[in-house]
Image (cartoon, coloured by chain):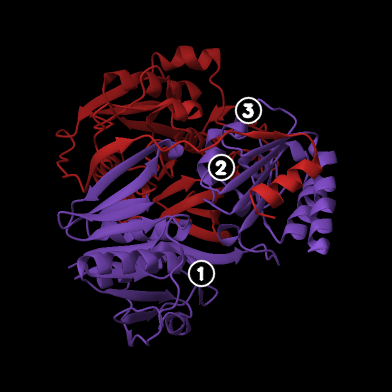
Chain colours: A red, B purple
Amino acid sequence: MKILVPIKRVADPNNANKVKVAPDGSSVTSEGLEWKLNPFDEWSLEAALRLTENAADKSRVGEVVLVSIGPSDATQTIRQGLAMGAERAIRVEGDDAQLDAWQVANVLAAVAKKEEPDLIVMGKQVVDGDSNVVPQYVAELLGWPALNYAQLLKLSADGKTIAAQRELDTGVETLEVDGPAVITCADRILHPQAVKNGVTPDDFAYPVAEGGRYASLKGIMQAKKKPIAEMSMADLGVDAAASVQYIAFELPPARSGNTVFVESVDELVQKLHTDAKVL
Amino acid sequence: MTDILVVAELYEGKNRKTTLSAVAFARQVAEATSGAFDILSIGEGANAAAQELAGFGARKILETEIAGGYVAENLAATVAGAAKGYGVVVAAGTAYGKDLLSRAAGKLAAGVAPDISAVRVDGGELVYTRPMYAGNVIATMKVTTPIQFVTVRQTDFEAAAASGGSSPIEKFAAQADEVAKRLRFGSLESVKSERPELTEADVIVAGGRALKSEDNFKNVIDPLADALGAAVGASRAACDAGYVAADLQIGQTGKLVAPKLYLAIGISGAIQHLAGMKGSKVIVAINKDKEAPIAQVADYFFVADLFDAVPALTEAVKKLATAG
């Protein structure tokens, strides 16, 4: 099984309230914030690694290929993904802050046509743009089904069909998808038994974690030697025009007023009743 | 003049209230551009659902009956087919709306303005406002393709009220899509609750990791929610730990809410959680740690052990209700 995992760097999402806007409102600046792997991409990479390994003896039984669009300093983020366990990577030269969803999707679809993976497993959104559009575009461009918001994946014996559960607003949907397909992951994909590939024993439980696996020291050392192929959008034959145009950015208004610290339940109820008038 | 197509969101043969947020957007744009809006009622039970929408001022309602549970691939070709001739296609920014509209937009190489919080007309063009970076940046943007796809935040587009009249209903033929055969719907398991729905509630009681167990969540959060007639929500940590179902998660992932009163119980207030609830009118935090980031948005903060404070608050709320 070969899985393509698109990844993107984002300004440290746990400090997203520290991003700034240029004085003329033309751009967002994340200066001073560390680049991190988009959390949804990290979880998707974790799912892809689980699908392509035997967790019992820690052997690899498939290939995970990372693809990222960005300038050369995005390589640092790519190495993080390689250190987690992906086999190799592709960096497509491009301005990750400027390309829109349609352009990104065209690049990813072009890479998929070249690589012919069995699956694309990717984040449902990047936490800077917060769009949740690219996976569906990619699937449409490839003529593949898209399984958004997966929380459970179980690979069939022949590796061609996936039995899945996904999170919708109205509940948990159970469905089956025939590959090749695009899959995006919900938070619950990190559950110790959320991914079953038929190689790792079915009763195996991964450790409880809030994110993807940590890179081991060995993984970090190996990542330095793993290949990162570099190419341009022109190499891929992609010249898609943008479909949206961002005009300006501003910081949101702060919540008015200060926090009132109350000393007792009675005081809280009285304040909610008399001052805020919400009880 | 911009004509708008609203894609209704059906669940168990009825419209979800989310549909009316998309109608609110459509009315606003139609009015501002002297255009008109139509509604596409699509899915299982589309006819009955179309009739529910007849009194909201649509020029007409298109109805496409497609049996089976929700998968975007079953519906997207029809949505894309119906979209031709419209300037804007809109749905609510729910999992359904984002999944379906992005797929349909892809078929038309059309741009998407996702999860918008406002729209205005500027020089004859639609300009959208949308939060990014977990709500820490507000962007204004345009869609530059001939047909624009939009999903709207329910928290910012209040459900449209019925306006009378009776929109004519026309059948619209379903369009087949080969790729749909590669996805097979099995079942949809919903947690049924007597409580108000999270995205529609005036009051929300939300619990976090500090509840420590599913039983505690039930025994501490539920009685307060019941006393307040509130919906129950949760942080990602509480959902991940299995204290409550994942569809109660509030945040950047999960649901966006903006009730009149939001009680954050044992929720530290990670940026990702704040992104989903900081539009609430009044926010109350009950937490042992007064330095918790939830303080950045809380109007009232009770520094206390939730296991003492919440049952006492439940009793006090009941007493207040009895006192009238």
User: Which residue carries the number 3 mark?
Assistant: A57
Q: Secondary structure at mark 3?
A: loop
Residue A187 is marked as 2
Do the numbered discs 2 and 1 sit on residues whose CB atoms are within 8 Å?
no
Which one is nearer the viewer's eye here, B77 or A271? A271
Vertical placement of residue A122 versus B14, above or below: above
Give the residue type that dot 2 points to: Asp
| Percent of width and height locating residue B67 | 46, 77
| Of pointers 3 and 2, the one earlier in the residue sequence | 3
Quadrant of the image occupied by residue A200: top right
Which one is nearer the viewer's eye here, A114 or B24? B24
Which one is nearer the viewer's eye here, B75 or B120? B120
Tell which tag, 2 or 1, sits nearer the viewer: 1
Chain name for mark 2: A
Residue furthest to the front: A274
> Residue sitting at 84 percent across and 57 percent down?
B319
Dot 2: within a 10 Å radius of its alpha carbon, few (fewer than 14), some, or many (20 or more) residues? many
Tell which tag, 3 or 2, sits nearer the viewer: 2
| Percent of width and height locating residue B4 | 27, 68
- Do the residues at pointers 3 and 2 share their chain? yes
Q: Secondary structure at mark 1?
A: loop
| Percent of width and height locating residue B187 | 58, 66
**In the image: residue A71, left or right of residue A55:** left
Q: Secondary structure at mark 2?
A: helix
Give the residue type that dot 3 points to: Asp
Chain name for mark 1: B
> Residue sitting at 59 percent across and 54 percent down?
B260
Chain name for mark 3: A
Tell which tag, 3 or 1, sits nearer the viewer: 1
Q: CA distance from mark 2 to mark 1?
A: 24 Å
**In the image: residue A88, left or right of residue A193:** left
User: Which residue carries the number 1 mark?
Assistant: B16
